[in-house]
Structures are given as C-alpha cells and as structure tokens.
Amino acid sequence: MAAELIFDKDLISRYDKAGPRYTSYPTAVQFHEEFGYQSYSENALRTNENPVPHPLSLYFHLPFCSTVCYYCACNKIITNNRKHAAPYLKLLHQEIELQAAFFDKDRVVNQLHWGGGTPTFISTEQMTDLMAFTRSHFSLADDDEGEYSIELDPRECNAETISLLRSLGFNRVSLGVQDFNPEVQKSVNRIQTEEETFEIIEASRREGFKSVSLDLIYGLPKQSAGSFSRTLEKVIAMQPDRLSIFNYAHMPDRFKVQKQIKETDLPDPAVKLEIFQNNIDTLIQAGYVYIGMDHFARPDDELAIAQAQGKLTRNFQGYSTHGDCDIVGMGISAISKIGDCYAQNIHAIPKYESCINSGTIPICRGFKLDNDDLLRQYIITQLICHLSLNFSDVEEKYLVDFSEYFYNELQALKIMQDDGLLSIDVEGITISPAGRLLVRNICMVFDKYLSHAKASQVFSKAI
C-alpha cells in the first residue's frame, strides 16, 4: 500500500479545503482554561497506577533564535544576546524538577526531543547541564535504544556541536533547509548554504547518528516548480533518512512576522500543486516511501517499518513510532499528552516564571478526553497512519455498533466513496491510492468539533 499513490488534480482541487493536521484529536483549538494545574497533576499521578505504566517521552521547548525567518509560525524569541538563555534555562531546570515529581522514577524515557526556536542557540555548557539535570530527574536510556532527537539550524552549529550532542545521548537530528534557492532564501530572511547543510549531515553520520531528517517548505515566495525541483535534487543527493516537506500556510493575521512576506511573491495554487506533485513523483522514484501528508522516509527507516507493521502513530512532532508513551512537554507553550488528557504550558516567559517560582507547573489550558473523544481519536489515528479502519476492531475496543454510532459519518463518506477516495464494505474503510493525499479530509468527517466556518481561519489547506 505504501507505494500506491494516485495524484488526481481534479479531486485535489475539489477537496483542497482548510482543516486540521491531526497531530492531536481533539485539536489544540479545543483546549480550554478550565483545565489547569490541578487537573494536570491529578491525571499525571494517576498514570503511575496503570498495571504497566507507559514509558515517557520528554519534549523541551528552547525558543531562542538569533534571526527571524519570515515564514515561521513557532513560539520564538528573537535575540542576538545569548545571555537571555540563562534565566530561561534556570526556570526550565525548575520545571524539570516539578514535572519529575509526578512520575515514578522507573518509567523509562523512550523518546526525548529538543525543539524551538533553535536549541543550539544555547552554549555547549548549557546543553551539557540541561541533559545532565534531565538525567538526574528522569530515567533516560543509557543503551542508545531511546529515540533522542534535536532540531538543528545548520547556521547555528558545527562539527564540534554534533560531536557534543552525540556524547550527550542524542541519536537523531532534524535539519531545517526549507529551500536552497538564494532568491527564495533572501525573501524569507534565511540565508543558508548547501555547504553548511552538507557539513552537518556528514558530521552527524561520522558521529553515528541513527537518522538524519531534513525539513523543506513549498509555497514560499519566489518559488517555482523548476526552482524547487533543483532544491529537491540537491537534497536527495544528501541522502537523508527522512524528509518532511511542509505546505507554507500564509496567515499573517495570526503570525505577524509573515507580514514581511509580499503576497504577490507567493506562487499561485496551480504552481503549488505542480510543486507538490513533482515532490511526490521525484521522491518515490528516488526510493522513498510516502508515509503520509508531508512525511517521506527510506524503506528501512523506523517510520516506514512502523507503518508496515501497523504501529505508526501521530503526535505534535508529526508521525511517530512511540505511540505508547506519555508525553511530558516542558518550556513555554510546550504540550503534554498524559493518559487521556492534553495540557499546554503558558506561552509568555513572565507568566511562566511566576508559576514556576510559585511551585506549580505552568499549565494555561488543556483538555480531558471522554469516551467519545477516545473513540474518534482512535479512528482518526488509524486512518491517518494506516489508511484503513476495521469496524470489528473498533466495536471490540469501544463496545459500540459502528454502523449505528457513526451512521451520519458513513453517509458523508459515501460521497467520498463515489469520488474514489475510499471504499467501504462490511469489514471497514480502506483509503484508495487517490485518497491518500486527502486523508485529512477523510478524518475531518469524524471530527465532531470541526466547524467549517472557522476552519479556514485556524487551519491550513490540505494541499
């Protein structure tokens, strides 16, 4: 199934609507302030009572960047003053201590990720201290079996940085590239040479990193189908293990920095569609597996293997192989997924500091899933990760009659079946090769919270 994909321009044009990427269900739009520190603490402590408590996944948000990229939609702090990191890291250390108190020490950390911002904005000493402090409070793996990853900006690190990161226990790196075209780079204020990128990739391989992933963005100003094809050729020559190629969503009303981008410089929808189709054709011909949405991987990569084995999941970092983990997010705006709840930290440092200094985890909002949420979350995860759904599995797991419980959804899916996006029979739903690129639209049918009137203001388009 992984190799079967049909690019139908007519279908894509008709279904190219705004909708969630389903890195969570319910999506973060549904998080509310009634869910706070007390709710979080009760749920976190309860996860230790499971007959077999889940392993942990730790996420650390390091928000600092020395320059701003105009396309960026991340929660970031732009500064050239490296001293600004020290007080933030002190608070982060305090949060680590507060969070660790909620989880039994024997719960092993199978996954760890530093994101941002630019994690390597902080000094080598600060990186060393942060990892050491984490190890003193959580049970990190010492055998290199955990998936410990970090996002890198090749302009902010070198071979010595890579060597240090490997010695600290990191074994996966994700590099931001976006586009190698100089004109495109200038238009988004991110000047980054191929040589800088290649140096970090080669250093990562020399140091024995298990996986190198590259991030690209299509739909940026000054891009054309031809120019992005040349970038893609250069990227393929670097032989990354994974590729994420994101669709740029121009939403300057939500992300003020995007006002620096001239809308007249953006490629029109037809050009974006041509770029998208070329990406898929080129990468599949180069031997990559289309995992789904914006993710590609080599056939021997853990993502591709997990999908083939039915073990793939999805979280706020995208597709993942660690669906069994409780996720503990630390730092401003970080999101946790603990048991059957989501919780998000405060976005601004002053309020974050106030909570930390009062001895409380800085939760600003969250969401407790009920049985219906868990049921729909399971369905959406199965469809978006594995392209099929078995009715009897759902009925056995959640004690419902699928055809009765989801009568309205099945009626809506019949239209998609007539359009060739999927097939429905007595056993379940199977997404067709033509429907793989529109899996978000299929999942939206099962989203009880989705308001199409609001979707265009909050979410990006499917393609």
Image (spheres, helix red, strand yellow):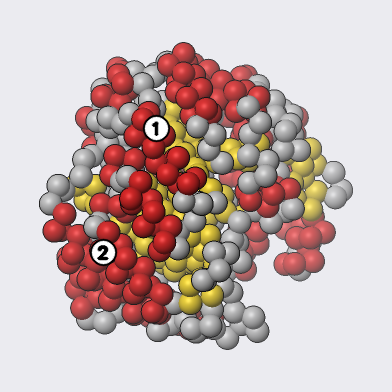
Residue 461 appears left or right of 137: right
Instruction: Answer whether residue 11 is visible to the viewer in this image.
Output: no
For badge 2, the amino acid type reads: Gln
Q: Position of residue 1 (x, y in %)?
A: 76, 38
The image quarter containing residue 416 is top right
Q: Dot 1, how many residues are within 10 Å of its Cα: few (below 14), some (14-19), or many (20+)?
A: many
Residue 318 appears left or right of 395: left
The secondary element bearing badge 2 is classed as helix
Residue that appears at 51% across and 22% down: 233
Q: Position of residue 281 (x, y in %)?
A: 62, 23
Q: Dot 2, how many residues are within 10 Å of its Cα: few (below 14), some (14-19), or many (20+)?
A: some
Instruction: Answer whether residue 198 is visible to the viewer in this image.
Output: yes
Residue 80 appears left or right of 230: left
Given residues 223 and 107, the one toward you in this image is 107
What label does residue 244 carry, if any?
Answer: none
Q: Which label lies toward us, 2 or 1?
A: 2
Nearest to N terminus: mark 2 or mark 1:
2
* Labels 2 and 1 touching (C-beta < 8 A): no
Q: Residue furthest front?
A: 206
Q: Position of residue 356 (x, y in %)?
A: 25, 75
Please count the marks in the image. 2
What label does residue 126 carry, if any?
Answer: 2
Residue that appears at 59% across and 74% down: 54
The secondary element bearing badge 1 is classed as strand
Given residues 403 and 290, the one toward you in this image is 290
Given residues 452 and 421, the one toward you in this image is 421
What label does residue 178 carry, if any?
Answer: 1
Whole-number angstrom distance, CA of label 2 to CA of label 1:
28 Å
* 238, above or below 407, in the image: above
For badge 1, the amino acid type reads: Gln
Residue that appears at 49% across and 56% down: 171
Given residues 385 and 22, the one toward you in this image is 385
